[in-house]
Amino acid sequence: MTQKIIIDTDPGQDDAVAILLALASPELEVLGLTVVAGNVPLDLTARNARIVCELAGRPDMPVFAGCDRPLARDLVTAEHVHGKTGLDGPQMADPTMPLQDMHAVDFIIETLRSQPAGSVTLCPLGPLTNIATAFRRAPDIVARVARIVLMGGAYFEVGNITPAAEFNIYVDPEAAKIVFDAGVPLTVLPLDATHKALTTADRVQAFRDLGTEVGRMVAAWTDFFERFDKEKYGSAGAPLHDPCVIAWLLAPDLFTGREINVEIEVDSPLTRGMTVADWWRVTDRPANALFIGGIDADGFFALLTERLARLS
Ligand code: BDR
Ligand code: CA
């Protein structure tokens, strides 16, 4: 049976690879892409999502533009990582497929109301503004969500945008708090896992060796994207954060984690957006997330490469 998902995203090179992985995987039925402001402003994330759909040969995929700013704060973007367009690297023509007229939040609400309860999984790959807005506006949909599988947060790895916080949670901590407190089954792919999914030279070469347009684009995106992380962390390549979300859906055995309590810091200027993860269970706060700490990186890249090979 296929799993129905909505991908909520702010592409981003790693978001783009996650979208390709989902579209290449027959186990998943992508009902639509909802885009949010994050890595770059909304007009660019809406453009980039459609570029990726066209690259995957899926101009029929509905793409919905959502919230253009966080619930209660100014937008913080990450051009220093992803470049001015958010998808810097190879030259990409503007997409020709349309953006849907409906707002992303309305699409999320309508889809959860019209699909059988417990049949749709939400996959947020950016700030959680669209999801939190949908939950606030239509509380009846919360109990209908099968699971949320998101990229965000950190524990041992702490922060990438501040010393304390990971980018997606930092940008809209109020939205993250709504989502983490919602009571929906939640899987979190934090930096602790994604920083182990590194694009080494061999792994990027394997994308290039596919000999397809998709293989060339993914290699070119990772080439661009990894310069930042190599410089910052001295690592062998870039972490492919967002594809870990889709990989967890496809092959959860590649990952290890713990059911723990995770709270979001919203008040402190110093630690805004920190995911306070009770990894050692030192409180009696109830678990609200499966927090992933380990990944079989070779298995992850083998899965990713095999799936990308199915696209032309
Ligand atoms: C997250 O932030 C973005 O820059 C990436 O696309 C990923 O979703 C990593 O912190
Ligand atoms: Ca992202």
Image: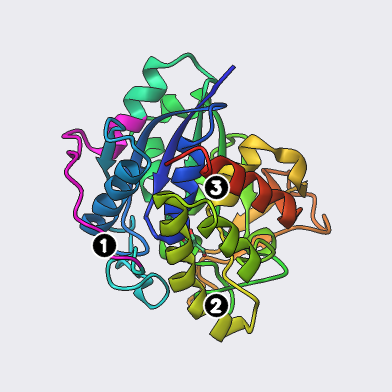
Residue 260 circle label = none
Residue 41 circle label = 1
What residue would you read off at disc 2? Answer: 229
Q: CA distance from mark 2 to mark 1?
A: 22 Å
Q: Which residue is depicted at the point 53% across and 33% down? A: 25
Of 18 and 120, which appears nearest the observer?
A: 18
Local SS, label 2: helix
Residue 222 included in the magenta stretch of the image: no
Q: Is residue 147 left or right of residue 133?
A: right
Tell us which disc is closer to us: 2 or 1.
2
Q: Which residue is depicted at the point 39% across and 78% down? A: 80
Under mark 2, the amino acid is Asp
Contact (Cβ within 8 Å) of mark 3 with mark 1: no
Q: Is residue 89 above or below residue 116?
A: below
Work out whether mark 2 precedes mark 3 in sequence or the reverse, and give the earlier one.
Answer: 3
What residue would you read off at disc 3? Answer: 150
Q: What percent of the width, then of the height, locates residue 33?
A: 35, 39
Quadrant for the C terminus, please.
top left
What is the basis of the colouring in this image? rainbow
Residue 94 included in the magenta stretch of the image: yes
